[in-house]
Image: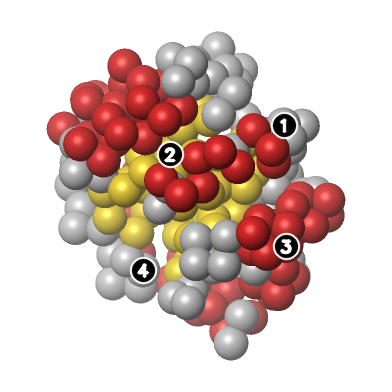
Amino acid sequence: MEYEIIPSILEVRDDAQKNLDMIKDAVKSVHIDVMDGIFVDDKTFGVDEVVELNTDLRMIVHLMTVDPHHLVPEYALAGADTIIFHVETAKDPEATIKLIKKDQCRAGISLRPGTSLEKIKPFLDDLDIVLVMTVEPGRGGQEIMPDMLLRVKELRRIAPDMDIMVDGGIDENTIRAAKEMGANMFVAGSAIFGSKKEKNPVKEIEKLRSAIE
Ligand code: ZN
C-alpha cells in the first residue's frame, strides 16, 4: 500500500499558486476543496480558479457541493486527476462515478461524519478512493473526531485494497493513528500551511512523513 501526504490549499487559497510552487517537489498531489456555499457555508475554489492553477501535481478535487454530477465535466476539463463527490448530494452516485471515469479521472466518494457508512457500501467495487471526513466539512483547523478513525478501520476491513483518504484534523499527532486504522492518503492543511508560526511547508510535510514511518 502506498502512503501519501496530500497538502490542502484551502487555507492559503488567496496565495494558492505561490504555495503550490513551494511544495511541488515534496509531494505528488494537491487537495482542492470546492465549496459552493450551499452544501457547506463557505464558498471556495470555483472552476475558474482551478483552471488558473499552474501545476504538475495531481489535482484531487473534493466537491463539497450540491448536484456534483453536473460539475464533473468542467473539473475534468480544468485538469482534475481525481474527482471526489459527497454521497449526501448525489442523486445517482453510480452514474456520477461512471461520468468521472468516462472523463478519464479517478473516482472518489466522501461522506460527512453523520452519514452512515452503509450509504457508500453499494459503490465500493466501482470506486478508486473513499474519502472519510474526519471532521465536519466546511472549514480548516478543526480537531479530528476519534469515531471517524473507527470508521476508517471498518472501511479497511471491508475494502482491503481501497485507497482510503482522511481529511480533517490530520497533523503530526494524529497521522499515525489514522495510518494504524487503515488510511493511506492523508490530507493536511493547517499542519502544513498553518499561520500560527512561521512555517516551511516542505519541512512540515517531512515531519508528517516521518510520523508514519
Ligand atoms: Zn477536502
Q: Mark 3 to mark 2: distance in Å?
A: 20 Å
Question: Which residue type does callout 3 highlight?
Answer: Lys
The residue depicted at 46 percent of the width and 27 percent of the height is 93
- Location of the C terminus by quadrant is bottom right
The residue identified by callout 3 is 153
Say which mark, if any, is on residue 27: 4
Percent coordinates x, y for residue 209 in the rendering:
53, 78
The residue identified by callout 2 is 84
Q: Image height check: is 123 above or below 36?
A: below
Question: Which residue type does callout 4 highlight?
Answer: Val
Q: Earlier in the sequence, mark 3 or mark 4?
A: 4
Q: Mark 4 to mark 2: distance in Å?
A: 19 Å
Kindly state the secondary structure of the residue where label 1 is placed: loop
Q: Report the mark closest to the observer, 4 or 2.
A: 2
Say which mark, if any, is on residue 115: 1
Kindly state the secondary structure of the residue where label 2 is placed: strand
Q: Earlier in the sequence, mark 1 or mark 2?
A: 2
